[in-house]
Image: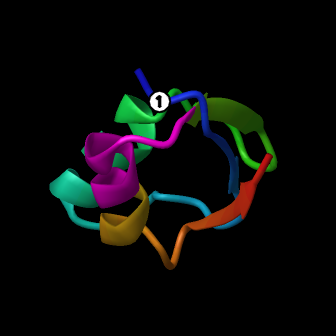
Amino acid sequence: MSDKKIKVTLVKSPIGTQSFHRASVRGLGLKRMHQSVVVEDTPANRGMVTRAAFLVKCEEV
């Protein structure tokens, strides 16, 4: 298991974006603007962050 964590914050609204961008944001556990979640640094989570990079801010924890 990976013990690395990343903090992901929703900085732009997913309203009006394509459905797979919204699905990536929801898959990361983000529901509201400026909400932050700490998730494991896995390839799946990194892929979701990359797909919605223009909506979220990501930093190492």
Does residue 39 appear to the left or right of 19 in the view shown?
right
**Secondary structure predominantly adopted by residues drawn in magenta:** helix
Q: Position of residue 33 (x, y in %)?
A: 73, 47
Q: Position of residue 52 (x, y in %)?
A: 40, 66
Residue drawn at (43%, 45%) of the image: 25
Q: In this picture, is 26 found above or below 33? A: above
Given residues 51 and 45, the one toward you in this image is 45
Residue drawn at (59%, 28%) of the image: 3
Residue 16 in view, yes or no: no
Q: Position of residue 27 (x, y in %)?
A: 36, 32
Q: In this picture, is 40 found above or below 21? A: above
Per the rendered image, the range of residues in magenta is 40-48
Given residues 34 and 50, the one toward you in this image is 50
Q: In this picture, is 5 found above or below 29? A: below
Q: Can you name the residue that lies furthest to the top here?
A: 1
Residue drawn at (22%, 65%) of the image: 18
In the image, what residue type sits under mark 1? Ser
Given residues 20 and 51, the one toward you in this image is 51
Given residues 8 and 15, the one toward you in this image is 8
Residue that numbered label 1 is attached to = 2
Q: How many marks?
A: 1
Q: In this picture, is 15 found above or below 35? A: below
On whether residue 60 falls in the magenta region, the answer is no
Residue 21 in view, yes or no: yes
Which corner quadrant of the image does residue 17 belong to?
bottom left
Instruction: Say what secondary structure mark 1 lies in.
Output: loop
Which corner quadrant of the image does residue 35 belong to?
top right
